[in-house]
Amino acid sequence: MNAHTRPKVGIFGLTGCAGDQLQILNCEDHLLRLAAELDIVDWVMAKSENDHSCRLDIAFVEGVVATERDLATLRQVRARTRTLIAIGTCAVWGGLPAMRNDLPREVLKHEVYQDGADFLDTVEARPATDFVPVEYRLPGCPIERHEFLELVSALLAGSVPELRQVPVCWECKTSEQVCRVLYHHEVCCGAMTRGGCGARCPSHGVPCSGCRGPVEEPHYDANITMFAGRGISWKEIAARMQHFSAPVWMKLGLEREVDHDAE
Ligand code: SF4
Ligand code: SF4
């Protein structure tokens, strides 16, 4: 990237809570520097005048594809962007919106809107990364500001961003927290979850529910066996793990065990 040319940047949201875009706005002291170093040309959440068609050097996209319009937006962004980055667990893994993909859309729509849901064109919620190739993935629910800033700095320096690969357990152990599994017999997903949050939940006495998505080689079966070995019911294990890891959980085929447990 030419040091004298500010890269053209776009920031986009598909279906989601917009929490990742808010995290960018929350960069506070760093915002002026970001505004000076990046030419943010398309960001409807933060600007009233935007260029929706120019070529982009860098684009960030958050959220899941849950409507046909999401998919059209995502494809359009991909087509005009050199370096596309999926931000947030929804865009990278599906996150909370993908949690109930096991239920038909019609059932979900009725639960929320009763009979007034005809205007909705929702489809099964899936991560943006299922539909288009991306150069980088920055998970988090929401993303961590320091990881976002590190990634931007690396891109501006023309280097390859190095994203954290250690599990939450590593951060938890190195900050000397009491283990929620060993000492409290709780379902804590820290061993399967990618670190970067500084083990925020165990540091506050709460088990990790896996909001940053899985590490590269998560040992789901070993962890489930460990939880069950501590007397935790299959039903509780399933309830705790399905927040962010639902697709993997389903693949394990353990719903059968959960049914059995519930009998
Ligand atoms: S509390 Fe959770 S994150 Fe911390 S060491 Fe135990 S399993 Fe890992
Ligand atoms: S400890 Fe787990 S649930 Fe809590 S913020 Fe970190 S990854 Fe998310």
Image: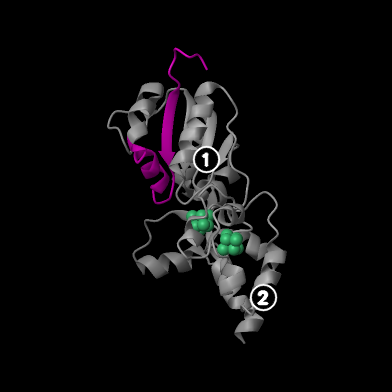
Is residue 155 placed above or below 11 in the rendered structure?
A: above
Residue at 39%, 43% in the rendered image: 23
Q: Is residue 20 magenta?
A: yes
- Residue 135 percent location from the top left of the image: 59, 33
Is residue 207 placed above or below 132 in the rendered structure?
A: below
Q: Judge left or right: residue 150 versus residue 53.
A: right
Residue at 55%, 71% in the rendered image: 239
Q: Residue furthest front?
A: 176
Q: CA distance from mark 2 to mark 1?
A: 34 Å
User: Reading the chain from its start, which is encountered first: label 2 or label 1?
Assistant: 1
Which quadrant of the render holds ligand 1? bottom right
Q: Please name the residue that numbered disc 1 is placed on.
A: 86
Q: Is residue 102 visible?
A: no
Q: Secondary structure at mark 2?
A: helix
Is residue 100 placed above or below 166 in the rendered structure?
A: below
Q: Nearer the viewer, residue 214 or 63?
A: 214
Q: Judge left or right: residue 120 versus residue 199.
A: left
For label 1, the crowd category at 10 Å Cα-Cα, with few meaning under 14, some 14 to 19 and many 20 or more, is: many
Magenta segment boundaries in residue numbering: 1-28
Q: What residue type is disc 2 on?
A: Ala
Q: Nearer the viewer, residue 25 or 125?
A: 25
Q: Please name the residue that numbered disc 2 is placed on.
A: 228
Residue at 41%, 68% in the rendered image: 110
For label 2, the crowd category at 10 Å Cα-Cα, with few meaning under 14, some 14 to 19 and many 20 or more, is: some
Q: Residue furthest bottom?
A: 263
Q: What residue type is disc 1 on?
A: Ala
Q: Residue furthest left?
A: 48
Q: Nearer the viewer, residue 250 or 120?
A: 250
Is residue 224 placed above or below 191 in the rendered structure?
A: below
Q: How many marks?
A: 2
- Residue 191 percent location from the top left of the image: 63, 58
